[in-house]
Image: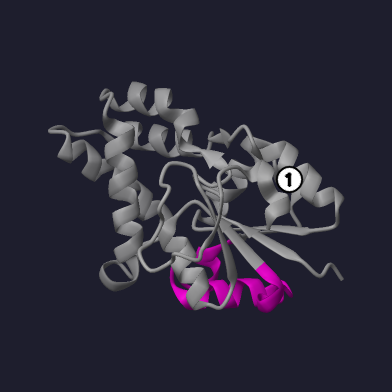
């Protein structure tokens, strides 16, 4: 049994939202759409458990697209929403991802994904980004009754595939993911993509500026 488990977030951490920026602009018609949507999407994710307990990930993704258009003073139709959802599945890896994953795999680390993406969207993302070969387990949080950063989602999902919590490290570029995983007693590493100071009160948090520095884990 591999004794060191790395659990990755997918969206933004491994896959680059910027890689689909042109498609989002073209489909929506607003050059500001990506920035507005990213903020709206994360805010809905963070309030999902309290305000939207019955909504699926795809529902939240769809709502975030519609609400972003509204905030920009317009509307988008159903075919546009479908195209935006499809674009979401086309994200490509950040430049530091594939070589780093290969190196980590070569030294015997167990690499895993725990994503909020629903099972169908997650499957398409992994296929389109061509990173599936690096992972032992590719898990959708939704399968385990919630979404990150709900504490129990981390515990249920990882235990279901035999991942030992106290031998695991979650790597994420989302402050809220770091907080949720920490509450579930996982070790965490913040991968800096855009935000350098992830959370107040986390001064001792281990951080890396690129996945290529994985040896510092």
Label 1 element class: helix
Q: Is residue 175 above or below residue 183?
A: above
Q: Is residue 138 magenta?
A: no
The foreground one among 186 and 41 is: 186
The foreground one among 157 and 189 is: 189
- Kindly tell me whether residue 23 is visible in this rendering: yes
Residue lying at the far left in this picture: please name it: 73
- In which quadrant is the N terminus drawn? bottom right
In the image, taking residue 109 as reference, residue 210 lies left or right, namely left
Q: Is residue 182 above or below residue 20?
A: below
In the image, taking residue 162 as reference, residue 171 lies left or right, namely left
Q: Looking at the picture, how far across and down is residue 90, in whole percent?
A: 54, 34
Residue lying at the far front in this picture: please name it: 203
Name the residue located 85 percent from the left edge and 57 percent from the top edge: 108
| Color theme of the render | one colour
Q: Is residue 152 magenta?
A: yes
- In which quadrant is the C terminus drawn? bottom right
Q: Dot 1 surroundings within 10 Å: few (below 14), some, or many (20 or more)?
A: many
- Kindly tell me whether residue 148 is visible in this rendering: no
Name the residue located 30 percent from the left edge and 46 percent from the top edge: 39
Q: Quadrant of residue 69?
A: top left
In the image, taking residue 168 as reference, residue 60 lies left or right, namely left
Q: Looking at the picture, how far across and down is residue 116, in whole percent?
A: 49, 58
The foreground one among 31 and 206 is: 206
In the image, taking residue 41 as reference, residue 137 lies left or right, namely right
Q: Looking at the picture, how far across and down is residue 75, in whole percent?
A: 19, 34
Q: Looking at the picture, how far across and down is residue 56, in whole percent?
A: 40, 60
Q: Which residues are magenta?
A: 140-168
The residue where tag 1 is placed is 101
Name the residue located 77 percent from the left edge and 66 percent from the top edge: 4
């Amino acid at each position: 049994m591999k004794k060191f488990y790395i659990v990755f977030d997918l969206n933004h951490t491994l896959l680059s939202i910027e890689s689909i920026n042109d498609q989002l602009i073209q489909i929506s018609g607003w050059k500001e759409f990506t920035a507005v949507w990213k903020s709206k999407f994360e805010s809905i994710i963070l309030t999902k458990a309290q305000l939207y307990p019955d909504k699926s990930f795809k529902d939240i993704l769809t709502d975030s697209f519609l609400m972003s258009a509204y905030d920009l003073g317009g509307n988008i139709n159903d075919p546009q929403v479908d195209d935006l959802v499809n674009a979401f599945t086309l994200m490509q890896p950040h430049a530091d991802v594939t070589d780093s994953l290969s190196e980590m795999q070569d030294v015997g680390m167990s690499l895993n994904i725990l994503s909020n993406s629903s099972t169908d969207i997650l499957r398409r993302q992994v296929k389109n980004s061509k990173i599936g070969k690096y992972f032992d387990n590719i898990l959708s949080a939704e399968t385990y009754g919630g979404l990150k950063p709900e504490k129990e989602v981390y515990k249920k999902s990882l235990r279901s595939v035999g991942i030992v919590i106290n031998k695991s490290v979650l790597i994420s570029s989302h402050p809220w993911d770091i907080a949720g995983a920490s509450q579930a007693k996982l070790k965490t590493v913040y991968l800096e993509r855009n935000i350098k100071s992830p959370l107040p009160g986390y001064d001792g948090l281990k951080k890396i500026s690129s996945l290529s520095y994985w040896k510092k884990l």
